[in-house]
């Protein structure tokens, strides 16, 4: 299985909340900081906003469950195509092919 970490984001008014399965969350005020340069998650003044965002996200889904299902599916696909090393050896597409398009590895 890969080492990618699930990330889930929601908007709550002016705020964008990013929940990571294995890392601390992030919180951005998109009106004041549209480039997302200042993470407010550790600022005690935003604790209530952070908590509300997490509650709203969990009302929609369980990040841990979705991440586990995605990683399980990724592992199944790797096996279907010969395992991790075979997929790496085959190469990269360089882009996502359009629906119905033919994948050509380089």
Image: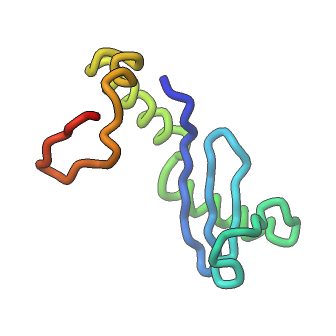
Q: Residue at x 62, y 58 (%)?
A: 18
Establish if 45 lies above or below 75: below
Q: Is residue 37 left or right of residue 92?
A: right
Q: Residue at x 56, y 30 (%)?
A: 3
Q: Is residue 85 left or right of residue 28?
A: left
Establish if 52 lies above or below 2: below
Q: Quadrant of the C terminus?
A: top left
The furthest residue to the bottom: 31
| Figure quadrant of residue 35 | bottom right
Q: Residue at x 54, y 53 (%)?
A: 8
State the image coordinates of residue 70 (x, y, percent, origin top left). Answer: 42, 36
Report the number of numbered marks: 0
State the image coordinates of residue 52 (x, y, percent, origin top left). Answer: 67, 66
Q: Residue at x 29, y 48 (%)?
A: 96
Here the colouring is: rainbow
The furthest residue to the right: 44
State the image coordinates of residue 98 (x, y, percent, origin top left). Answer: 20, 53
| Figure quadrant of residue 104 | top left
């Amino acid at each position: 299985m890969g080492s990618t970490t699930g990330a889930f984001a929601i908007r709550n008014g002016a705020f964008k909340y990013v929940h990571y399965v294995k890392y601390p969350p992030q919180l951005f005020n998109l009106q004041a900081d549209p480039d997302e340069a200042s993470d407010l998650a550790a600022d005690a003044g935003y604790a209530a906003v952070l908590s509300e965002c997490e509650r709203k996200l969990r009302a929609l889904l369980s990040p841990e469950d979705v991440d586990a299902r995605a990683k399980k599916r990724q592992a199944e696909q790797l096996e279907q195509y010969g395992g991790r090393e075979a997929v790496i050896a085959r190469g990269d597409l360089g882009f996502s092919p359009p629906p119905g398009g033919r994948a050509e590895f380089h």
